[in-house]
Image: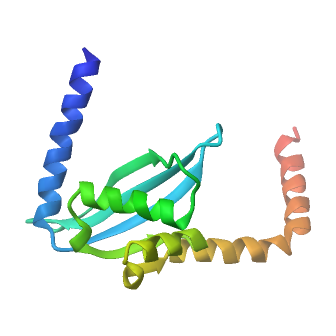
């Protein structure tokens, strides 16, 4: 039963989302690659847009697929292009937001969207904070141990 209903439901929802994307002028994309515990490379791609006619911000996952190949700029670019083509939104892309990995910049350049590429400010800020905290890690560790001592005291 689920082998028929789930794919049918997916196709129905996909068609609804395609219609929604057709009605909007601009779509921003976020993408990130990640590695599973089994060392498989995945690429997640999400679309962000204002839904017409109510103009509510929407974020929809378009793809979270196995890359199958090495995570090179060319391979990631080809995977991104395939998703944008499948969803018929290549001409609507207003931004492609990624972390600062060089491979992501290469991927976006590979498919001709270099002028639409932006780095995620949240990711950059996280890196700055991590680097800053590293200097204080010995102090933070001591504070944690003291807090744990008092937390576990009767």
Q: Is residue 7 above or below residue 63?
A: above
Q: Is residue 138 left or right of residue 130?
A: right
The quarter in which the N terminus is drawn is: top left
**Can you tell which quarter of the image residue 135 is in?**
bottom right
Name the residue rendered at 22%, 73% in the picture.
91
The quarter in which the C terminus is drawn is: top right
Name the residue rendered at 37%, 81% in the picture.
116
Colour setup of the view: rainbow
How far from the left and from the top, in percent, is residue 149?
90, 47
Name the residue rendered at 63%, 71% in the picture.
126
How far from the left and from the top, in percent, is residue 20?
14, 57
Q: Is residue 54 visible?
A: no
Query: Foreground residue, 124 or 63?
Result: 63
Q: How many dots with numbers? A: 0
Query: Foreground residue, 12 or 107?
Result: 107
- Outermost residue toward the bottom? 115
How far from the left and from the top, in percent, is residue 64?
42, 48
Q: Is residue 68 left or right of residue 64?
A: right
Query: Foreground residue, 52 or 109?
Result: 109
Name the residue rendered at 67%, 73% in the picture.
127
How far from the left and from the top, in percent, is residue 148?
85, 48
- Outermost residue toward the left? 53
Q: Is residue 22 left or right of residue 101?
A: left
**Can you tell which quarter of the image residue 143 is in?**
bottom right
Q: Is residue 148 visible?
A: yes
Query: Foreground residue, 25 or 153?
Result: 25
């Amino acid at each position: 039963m689920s082998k028929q209903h789930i794919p049918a439901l997916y196709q129905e929802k996909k068609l609804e989302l395609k219609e929604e994307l057709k009605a909007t002028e601009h779509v921003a994309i976020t993408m990130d690659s990640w590695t599973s515990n089994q060392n498989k490379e995945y690429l997640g791609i999400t679309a962000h847009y204002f839904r017409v006619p109510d103009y509510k911000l929407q974020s929809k996952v378009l793809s979270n697929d196995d890359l199958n190949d090495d995570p090179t700029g060319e391979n990631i670019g080809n995977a991104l292009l395939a998703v944008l083509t499948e969803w018929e939104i290549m001409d609507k892309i207003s931004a492609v937001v990624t972390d600062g990995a060089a491979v992501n910049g290469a991927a976006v350049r590979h498919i001709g969207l270099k002028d639409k590429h932006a780095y995620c400010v949240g990711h950059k800020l996280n890196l700055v904070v991590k680097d800053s905290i590293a200097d204080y890690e010995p102090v933070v560790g001591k504070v944690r141990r003291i807090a744990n001592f008092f937390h576990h005291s009767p």
